[in-house]
Image (cartoon, grey):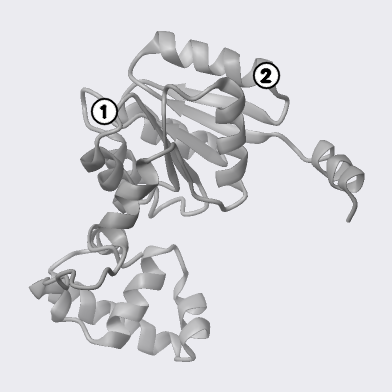
């Protein structure tokens, strides 16, 4: 495909729908104006200033990308992710924060965000970041990617993760749990692992019993906390 053909294809693409989550109304208003004024490639479909409002709004509008603040009075971006991601696995989350602290970056990425950018980013760069995560890329502001690599890479000499609860699960139970946390239906898990739906149900029941959890949403959060997803 030539460059001109790629451009024509891009111009025919529908705008990426975006939901803004930030506890400062002035920032949300400015971000909305900036995003929609610099490009017709994104369309803001809603906004929220708290965790509860964010969860309800995302469920209602089902955007492609959520721009997610990390710190809010009633909980952070990680809490929004824990509540929404198991239910709406196709929604992509991009953290947008004033903080560039390693612990904030790692916490929200572990919870399931696809990227993390700071509020020093320009409007055009933010549009580009939104488009990229919508297309499946991971996006980070300069130097933040190093935090993630340090946290998740299996480096020589690094200590193995020791989790007694996780050690209770068999390898097959972990496989089933991983797919379940990614939003797969039982039928899809069975197809992916070449087992019967009944066997999937048996594994899920076993995992619920071993973890002492009550439903798939709790299991998804449990798996995400242990970096199985």
- Locate residue 9 relative to residue 206 in the image: left or right: right
> For this rendering, which residue is in front, 99 or 33?
99
Q: Residue furthest top?
A: 26
Give the residue number, with chain letter if any, for mark 2: 38
Where is residue 61 drawn, in percent x and y? Answer: 54, 34
Q: Residue furthest front?
A: 156
> For this rendering, which residue is in front, 4 or 57?
4
Secondary structure beneath disc 1? loop
Secondary structure beneath disc 2? helix
> For this rendering, which residue is in front, 162 or 188?
162
User: Which of the 4 quarters of the picture holds residue 126?
Assistant: top right
Where is residue 197 drawn, in percent x and y? Answer: 44, 85
> In the image, what residue occupies the spot 30% across and 48% down?
147
> In the image, what residue occupies the spot 33% across and 39% down?
80
Give the residue number, with chain letter if any, for mark 1: 71
User: Which of the 4 quarters of the picture holds residue 182?
Assistant: bottom left
Where is residue 224 drawn, in percent x and y? Answer: 29, 59
> In the image, what residue occupies the spot 20% across and 81% down?
169
- Locate residue 149 relative to residue 6 in the image: left or right: left
- Locate residue 190 relative to residue 205 in the image: left or right: right
- Whole-angstrom CA distance, mark 2 to mark 1, is 27 Å
Q: Nearer the viewer, mark 2 or mark 1?
A: 2
The residue carrying pointer 1 sits among few (fewer than 14), some (14 to 19) or many (20 or more) residues within 10 Å by Cα, namely some
Report the label total.
Answer: 2
The residue carrying pointer 2 sits among few (fewer than 14), some (14 to 19) or many (20 or more) residues within 10 Å by Cα, namely few
């Amino acid at each position: 495909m030539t460059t001109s053909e790629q451009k024509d294809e891009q111009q025919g693409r529908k705008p990426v729908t975006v939901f803004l989550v930030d506890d400062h109304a002035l920032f949300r208003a400015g971000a909305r104006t900036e995003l929609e004024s610099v490009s017709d490639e994104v369309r803001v479909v809603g906004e929220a200033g708290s965790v509860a409002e964010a969860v309800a709004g995302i469920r209602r509008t089902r955007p492609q990308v959520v721009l997610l603040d990390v710190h809010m009075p009633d909980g952070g971006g990680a809490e929004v992710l824990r509540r929404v991601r198991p239910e709406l696995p196709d929604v992509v989350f991009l953290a947008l924060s004033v903080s560039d602290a390693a612990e904030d970056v790692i916490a929200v990425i572990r919870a399931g965000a696809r990227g993390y950018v700071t509020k020093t980013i320009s409007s055009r760069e933010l549009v580009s970041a939104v488009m990229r995560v919508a297309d499946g890329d991971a996006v980070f502001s300069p130097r933040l990617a190093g935090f993630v690599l340090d946290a998740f890479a299996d480096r020589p000499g690094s200590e193995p993760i020791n989790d007694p609860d996780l050690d209770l699960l068999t390898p097959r139970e972990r496989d089933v749990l991983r797919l379940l946390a990614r939003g797969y239906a039982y039928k899809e898990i069975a197809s992916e692992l070449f087992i019967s739906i009944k066997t999937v149900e048996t594994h899920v029941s076993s995992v619920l019993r071993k973890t002492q959890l009550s439903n798939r949403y709790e299991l998804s959060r449990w798996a995400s906390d242990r970096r199985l997803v």
